[in-house]
């Protein structure tokens, strides 16, 4: 069980967006029982307030609910209670270190580092008003974090009979967005890009007599051509 706490200044924009995006991802990946995920603030400015309406609407656009979430402030005890405490900018890190008396176990991180952007920050949309950019940054960071924590992914194609079913499994397990194509070129692009870069894949192939068996084998070859570590069964 991995416990993740996302922490921003007020706990009404960035950190609750990350909390509920990450919860949605692990649920869709079938990993909900492996994680505890929450969010909090470094300040007391918004205590008890719900998620800021533009952030709530941005989550809702993607079918994600944050109903019932209200802001709460971190305490010194949170350091021992969580495995990872993830902020969004330098001020978040400094305020967490002040509250916790340092970071002796290396638990404090910035979310962009998991998207392959170490040293970068995610700006507070309370000031920028750019909730689209915040969504993109949070989504990339959470996907990268999931990859870091779960570097091996099983793709169970064993029950598939048709080509479309193969892509249904890949889309669900690899958390493809609606903007990705369902073809081999798109598959190659996804495997060679974050957050799947460096991931290993265990592929359970369809039955020998399945009409899509040959295509599934070609898919497995695309994973290998993209540089991924692949094991096939079936």
Image (cartoon, rainbow, N blue to C red):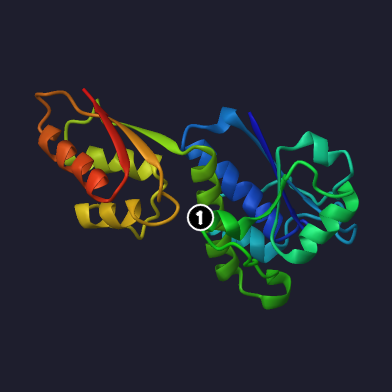
Query: Measuring 42% from the left and 35% from the top, which residue is drawn there?
Result: 152
Query: Measuring 40% from the left and 43% from the top, which residue is drawn there?
Result: 199
- Look at the picture and state if 70 lies above or below 31: below
Residue 53 is left or right of residue 176, and the answer is right
Query: Measuring 81% from the left and 35% from the top, which residue is drawn there?
Result: 80
Q: Nearer the viewer, residue 230 or 69?
A: 230
Q: Position of residue 180 (x, y in %)?
A: 33, 57
Q: Is residue 42 visible?
A: no
SS label for mark 1: loop
Query: Measuring 17% from the left and 40% from the top, which residue is drawn there?
Result: 163
Q: Nearer the viewer, residue 155 or 166?
A: 155
Q: Is residue 23 visible?
A: yes
Label 1, on which residue? 62
Residue 81 is left or right of residue 159, and the answer is right
- Look at the picture and state if 194 lies above or below 126: above
Q: Position of residue 42 (x, y in %)?
A: 84, 56
Residue that sits furthest to the front in the current view: 104
- Point out the image quarter for the C terminus: top left
Query: Disc count in the image?
Result: 1
Residue 153 is left or right of residue 56, and the answer is left
- Point out the image quarter for the N terminus: top right
Q: Residues within 10 Å of mark 1 (few under 14, many from 20)?
A: few
Q: Position of residue 64 (x, y in %)?
A: 56, 49
Q: Position of residue 71 (x, y in %)?
A: 81, 52
Residue 120 is left or right of residue 79, and the answer is left
- Look at the picture and state if 216 lies above or below 95: above
């Amino acid at each position: 069980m991995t416990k993740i706490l996302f922490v921003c200044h007020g706990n009404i924009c960035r950190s609750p967006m990350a909390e509920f995006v990450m919860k949605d991802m692990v649920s869709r990946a079938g990993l909900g029982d492996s994680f505890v995920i929450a969010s909090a603030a470094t300040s007391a400015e918004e205590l008890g307030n719900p998620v800021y309406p533009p952030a709530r609407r941005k989550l809702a656009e993607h079918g994600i609910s944050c109903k019932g979430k209200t802001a709460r402030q971190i305490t010194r005890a949170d350091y021992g209670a969580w495995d990872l405490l993830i902020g969004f900018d330098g001020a978040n890190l400094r305020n967490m270190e002040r509250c916790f008396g340092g970071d002796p176990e290396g638990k404090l991180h910035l979310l962009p580092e998991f998207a392959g952007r170490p040293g970068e920050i995610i700006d507070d949309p309370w000031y920028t008003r750019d909730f689209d950019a915040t969504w993109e940054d949070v989504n990339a960071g959470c996907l990268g974090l999931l990859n870091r924590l779960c570097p091996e992914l099983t793709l169970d194609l064993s029950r598939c009979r048709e080509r479309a079913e193969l892509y249904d499994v890949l889309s669900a397990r690899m958390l493809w967005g609606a903007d990705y194509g369902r073809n081999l070129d798109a598959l190659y692009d996804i495997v060679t890009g974050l957050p799947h870069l460096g991931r290993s894949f265990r592929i359970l192939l369809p039955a020998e007599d399945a009409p899509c068996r040959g295509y599934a084998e070609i898919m497995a070859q695309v994973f290998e051509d993209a540089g991924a570590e692949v094991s096939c069964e079936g």
